[in-house]
Amino acid sequence: MEKNITILGICGSLRRDSFNRALLNYAATLEIEGIKIKIADISNIPNFNQDMEKQMPESVKVLKDEIKNADAVLISTPEYNRSIPGVLKNAIDWASCPYGENVFDEKPVATMGATVGAFVGTAIVQYHLREIFSSLNAHPLEKPQLFVANAPLKIKDGKVIDDDTKELIKEVVVKLAEWAKRINQN
């Protein structure tokens, strides 16, 4: 019997009614054989401070353990000022430190994002994340890419209502699981 793939979802927004949290929540409800999705909570992680590495905060230890124990990571994030939201970058910085304890090392990672605008507003943040993950020796999934424009038309009351978006989320999850199997077989 083949091992189940565990994917850890991380949302780059703390907003209660976040469109990006809705994408992750939908992904977590998918019933795909052999795939389990758990969503991390990064809301209580303090600002990164290298002085705290030796007595790492409990919330950071939990996140690092969740990433370490997952077969892959799925990030859903908005784009702030054409880049990564501070809360997400902060979580990534903590997870990659201290030196020699980077839990993203060799980790398969995929990104997706939603924006209220008609323009594909999360493209730049997703490319910035790929650059960061490459430098952390993670393995970013290049395709498929999921950029959800006009999010208020596709997500209502915290639920993904657009069938095409649902199908694309499922495709990202399946491809990430396949990618994780390839990467982790060595």
Image (cartoon, rainbow, N blue to C red):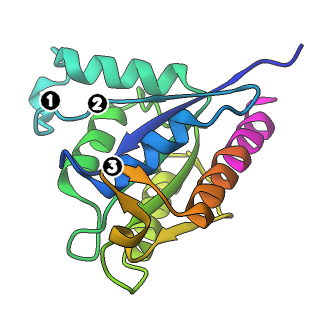
Q: Which residues are magenta?
A: 175-186
User: Which residue is the site of mark 2?
Assistant: 41
Q: Is residue 145 left or right of residue 85?
A: right
Q: Which residue is more in the foreground, 91 or 50? A: 91
Q: Are marks 2 and 3 in contact (CB under 8 Å)?
A: no
User: Which residue is the site of mark 1?
Assistant: 44
Quarter of the image where one finds residue 91: top left
Q: Quadrant of the N terminus?
A: top right
Circle 1 or circle 3, nearest the eye: 3
Q: Which residue is more in the foreground, 80 or 37? A: 37
User: Alpha-carbon neighbours of circle 2 within 10 Å: few (<14), some, or many (≥20)?
Assistant: some
Mark 3, secondary structure of its residue: loop
In this rendering, the answer to whether 98 lies above or below 1 is below
Residue 101 at x, y = what percent?
Answer: 41, 26
Mark 2, secondary structure of its residue: loop
Question: In the image, what residue occupies the spot 77% across and 34% down?
Answer: 181
Q: Is residue 182 magenta?
A: yes
Q: Residue furthest right?
A: 1
User: Alpha-carbon neighbours of circle 3 within 10 Å: few (<14), some, or many (≥20)?
Assistant: some
User: Which residue is the site of mark 3?
Assistant: 158
Circle 2 or circle 3, nearest the eye: 3
Q: Is residue 12 left or right of residue 183?
A: left
Residue 53: mark: none
Q: Which residue is more in the foreground, 32 or 110? A: 32
Question: In the image, what residue occupies the spot 45% across and 38% down?
Answer: 9
Residue type highlighted by circle 1: Asn
Question: In the image, what residue occupies the spot 37% across and 78% down?
Answer: 121
Residue type highlighted by circle 3: Gly
Please tell me whether the stretch drawn in magenta is mainly helix, strand or loop.
Answer: helix
Q: Quadrant of the C terminus?
A: top right
Circle nearer the N terminus (2, 3): 2
Residue type highlighted by circle 2: Asp
